Image: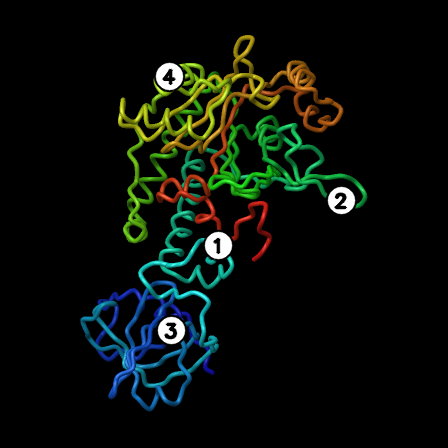
Amino acid sequence: MKRMNSEERQLVGKISLSSESNHESHDEVTVMGWIHRIRKLKSVTFLILRDRSGLLQCILTPEQTEQHNLTLESVVQLQGRCVPSKNDYGQIELIARSVKILSQAMPELPIQINGASLEVQLDTQLEHRVLALRHPKEQAIFKIQAAIGDAFRSFLKEQDFTEIHTPKLVKEGAEGGSNVFKLDYFGETAYLAQSPQFYKQMMVIAGMERVFEVGSVFRAEAHSTSRHLNEYVSLDLEMGFIEHEDELMSLETELLKYIFQELSKNYKKELELLEAALPDVPSDIPKLKLEEAIVILKTQYGKTELEGDLDPEGEKLISNHIFKETGSDFLFLTHYPQRKRPMYTMPCGEEETHSFDLIFRGVEITTGGRRIHDYQTLVSAMQRKGLDPEMYRSYLEAFKYGAPPHGGLAIGLERLTALLLGFSNIRRTSLFPRDGQRLMP
């Protein structure tokens, strides 16, 4: 088979976009993709071809149809000419001169993917994940998710942040707890990283001042909820020389504005396909101390059991409360108690911390705050948490030789995507979820 040149490869993507302005009538083209639909009539067969950019109607003769075993999802190559034709898929169609099957699909598909939506349970989708991901709506999810990551990077680079890549095999857990995946590292105990936290701080202290990372993190909680994963992608940033956590909250506000502007500008088709509405990000996102939120929930909503943190119901209730009062889908909850925050969090008074969570549409998507930058204060904080400083000696080493005031935050990519698109289950926005029950595919 003749290898296509770069111009021909580009043409494959263009023709399936229904952008007939790129083609003169009777253009000879080669297209390749999956058989999305087949409709056989007495004198003609309509074959709908799907590639990464969309759908194209193709016309085959009865002889061509009989010659080939055409099954849904088979991968084919068609050669022919374009002609003007108003149809459900665009303004042109392809009159096929030749048909070649590149890969034959089995005749019985475990799920049907050529409908308007996938009409199967999520567990069934995940069992047949690769096939399910061929559906345009499923692909739209991950195009939007990729765009969120791209916008995160672009915004921070404009703010003079440097992207870093930190180890995922570590000697100690960043949170100092038991929710870590333990593994054997050549006879030594190691863990999968819960967070790039220590390394972000080290790089700030190393003099880079502003760093970020987009990478997987691992949490060994034995939960089975619609909002948690055991492996997820974290959008992390850390910056030096801050005086207050308000600077971090302001940065995140502008970051979110930028992300949603990029989505609105470049991903309208995907957002419309998923019927997703982008939120307005206020210039000044409402802020509420955690204790104040708990008082509101106790007095106005009867949530008397809350102490030092919010449960999922509490997050939803306080989010709805703020939305009714201000119209904001976002809420910063601040001043979490020291007992609820990791040992590196900067104390605020005797009990609280200079920390915050960002609640979006009733669910926490961000945790952030200032960090302790004084060596001895950090050692004391570890000891108060019952941690052995000797276990964190490589981390502590960085603080012995001058560490600037700093802070940072982390955003869960899958959770942000799910809330943005209106999904109740975070597994919808994970390509291959890892959730305590699933290690395949």
Q: Disc 2, disc 4: CB below 8 Å?
A: no
| Residue located farthest toward the right when viewing the structure as drawn | 187
Image location (x, y in percent) of residue 251: 41, 28
Residue depth check, mark 1 versus mark 3: number of the one nearer the observer: 1
Amino acid type at mark 4: Ile
The residue carrying mark 4 is: 296
Name the colouring of the figure.
rainbow
Left or right relative to 245: residue 202:
right
Q: Nearer the viewer, residue 101 or 432?
A: 432
Residue depth check, mark 4 versus mark 3: number of the one nearer the observer: 4
Work out whether mark 1 precedes mark 4 in sequence or the reverse, and give the earlier one: 1
Work out whether mark 1 precedes mark 3 in sequence or the reverse, and give the earlier one: 3
Specify the quadrant that holds the C terminus. Answer: bottom right
- Check the image and report above or below for 204 versus 307: below
Residue at image coords 37%, 16%:
296
Image location (x, y in percent) of residue 400: 69, 20
Give the secondary structure at mark 1.
helix
Work out whether mark 2 precedes mark 4 in sequence or the reverse, and give the earlier one: 2
Q: CA distance from mark 1 to mark 2?
A: 32 Å
The residue carrying mark 3 is: 35
Give the secondary structure at mark 3.
strand
The residue carrying mark 2 is: 184
